[in-house]
Every structure is written in C-alpha cells, then in structure tokens.
Amino acid sequence: MSLRRSARTKAANSPALVETATTPRTIVTGKQEPKKRAKQTAGKTNGLKKVKLNAEAEESKQSLGKDYKTPPLPTTPLRRKKATKVQPPITPTPSLVKIIAPYSSGDIDDQSPPPLDRPVEPHRTNATLVTPGGTQRTAYPVSLNDASPSKTGLPRPTATTGNLLERALEHLRSADARMIPLIENHHCHIFSPEGLAEEIDPFRSLASGIMAQQVSGAAAKSIKNKFIGLFHEGQPEDQSVMFPTPAQVAATDITRLRLAGLSQRKAEYIQGLAQKFVSGELSTEMLLKATDEEVMEKLIAVRGLGRWSVEMFACFGLKRTDVFSTGDLGVQRGMAAFMGRDIKKMKAKGGGKWKYMTEKEMESIAEAFRPYRSLFMYYMWRVEDTDVQALEGN
C-alpha cells in the first residue's frame, strides 16, 4: 500500500520537474535575462566550442604524422596605398625665367613663334636653306634696310613672306576670274608664311628625289631610312636622325651605299650629286641667288636629275614662284579641264604625250599668270585633284 502511494506521489511531481528544467528563465520568472549575463553565457559556450575544435584539430594533426604543418589562417590583404606622383623638375627655359616672353597665338597647343616676316622676290629662292654645316641662309637679309641692290647684288625685293601669297592670289584672280573658286576652295600652304618658314636642306631634298624615282612611296621611305642608317650605325633607322652630309656620301664606297636598297645607277647618281656639292659646283649660295634659268641649267646637268625633278625641287623645295612644268601630265590634264575640254573623251581618244593640250598652248595660257606660275600650276593640279602632298614628300 505504501509502495503504490509512493509511486503516485512521484508521478505527480515529475511534470513540474521536467518543465522547470526545460523552460527558459524568462517564462518561469516573467523577466528577461540581462544582456551582459547573456553575453557572458554565449562567451562561455563559444569558448567550450573552441576548446572542442582545437582538441579535434590536435587529434587530427597527430593522426596525420609529425610532418604535418598547420596551414596559416586566412587573412584579408591590406589595400595598397596609391603612390604619390612626383613631378619632374622644371626646366629653366628662357621664357620660364622671364628672359623672354613665351609666344602664344591664342591656341592652347600652339607653342611655336610666328613666322619671321622677311623680304622675298618671285625670281629668287624664297625658302630658308640649310648648309651642310647646319647654317641657315636666305636670299635677302631679314631687315628690309639691308636688302638694297647695292648690298645684296640682287633686284630689290617686291614682297615679304607675310604678304607674298596674298599678292600672288590677287594677281591670279585678276588674270582670270575662273581662278576664284579654286582659290577659295584650296589653301596653298607652300607659299604661305608658314610654308615659307620651312627650312630646306638642298642636298637631302635632291638625293631623296633620286631615291624616290620609279618606286612606291613606302619603298622610297624605307630606302631613305636605311640610307641614313648607314651613317648612324647603332641608332634607329629614323628620318629624325641627321641626313649625311655631301662630304660623308662622297667619301663612301658605292658598294656600301647600295646596302640601303639603291640600284647601282642610283647609288652613282647620289654620290655624283654629293661630289658636286663638295667641289662647290653646287652650293647653297648659288641656289639662293641664281636666276630661275641658271638654277635649271645647273641642276639638270647633274646625272639623275631630269627636268621634271628639277622643276618640282624649284617649286616645292626652293619656293620659287614662277616655275611652270609643261611635262607634268597632271598639270596638262588640269589645264584642259580648266579650259572646258572633255577629259574623258580626250583620254579615250589617245594622242600620246600631248593628248590633252600641246606644250605651246600650255605656255601661252600660263603666260598671263607670270611671275606666279608656280601657284597657277598648283591650282591646275587641284582641278583634277592631283595629290600634291606626294610631290612635296621628298
């Protein structure tokens, strides 16, 4: 009897015990456990977990053997700090130290000074020529007061580099009103102040013209670069490297000159040209001050320089304003179109060298444009859209 009663009493008390053990304190008491104590409890739990994990890792390490090395814990790489850019030291140029004022045309990228306004004359060389020694020469002194015939031995200059182009264009417009639209649509850089300010090395220009004969533009450029490289071994084949002087070329064996890709004949022509500059038969002084006829006569006498090559050099190189080439097919075709002829019909019909216009006709028409026939010729190329830059390229 006492056993049954004891069992019943024990059974009645059991649910309360279970509920007390499993029910959270907040439910029993109705109060929330403080946060600080909750953190401490969580910390103890995490600590027990870490101890257990470390024990398991140690046991695993022992099972793998003595050679096992614990891999390093992953770390977040630090961000690289951007290096501070150090500016290069300032170059003390004359304009920077205020010895001279820097020039500006108003364009932010324009750092070049304005072209020098100097005296020029149609029947003389208007370009600045560079001697083999690197000296710059012009036909007339910079000062107009020093350009008198008694001092220069030349005719008195009739224009300056600043107004030559406008004077020439005015003459062309007055000679034939049909020139007006051509002039308006095509700027003639060759005889502009900027074009006249360009420096020309006569030997380089003439030698380059010989190299370019009967080959493509790309081939001519390659030959020129290799030719320059013969005299600057170990340096890049680049036109920015100084072109050899006449004395250097004259003293070089033909076999070596041919290594640039020149034919035997072209190598002989270029060496012969160099020898004429060395002997003084050709000179910067002569090219500057001789008449148009004298320049043509002297240069055509050089082997490898035909009449057309010399005419192109006189126009684009020396910047002489009264050059006219009747032997240029582009000029002949342009003049025929300018005079209103049907170019397509004439081309199909044939007729040899003078199929578009006879030499006599060309000279007769061009006569009205003296002493600026170089500019008239330039615009006749433009009538038929001839690539004038290809002619200037040498």
Image (tube, rainbow, N blue to C red):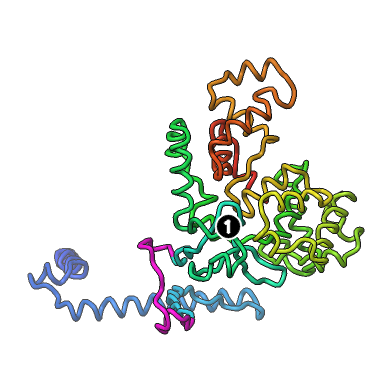
Residue 270 picture location, percent across and down: 82, 56
Please give the range of residues in magenta.
89-110
The answer, for residue 252, to whether it is visible in the render is yes
The answer to if 215 sits in the magenta stretch is: no
Disc 1, SS = loop
| Residue 342 falls in image quadrant | top right
| Residue 197 falls in image quadrant | bottom right
Read off the residue under disc 1. Answer: 126
| Residue 280 falls in image quadrant | bottom right
Magenta portion: prevailing SS class: loop
**Does residue 348 appear left or right of residue 255 in this picture?**
left
Residue in the image at 42% along x and 39% along y:
184
- Which residue is at the front of the view, 5 or 363? 363
- Which residue is at the front of the view, 10 or 22? 22
Q: Is residue 285 above or below residue 366?
A: below
Residue 129 picture location, percent across and down: 64, 63
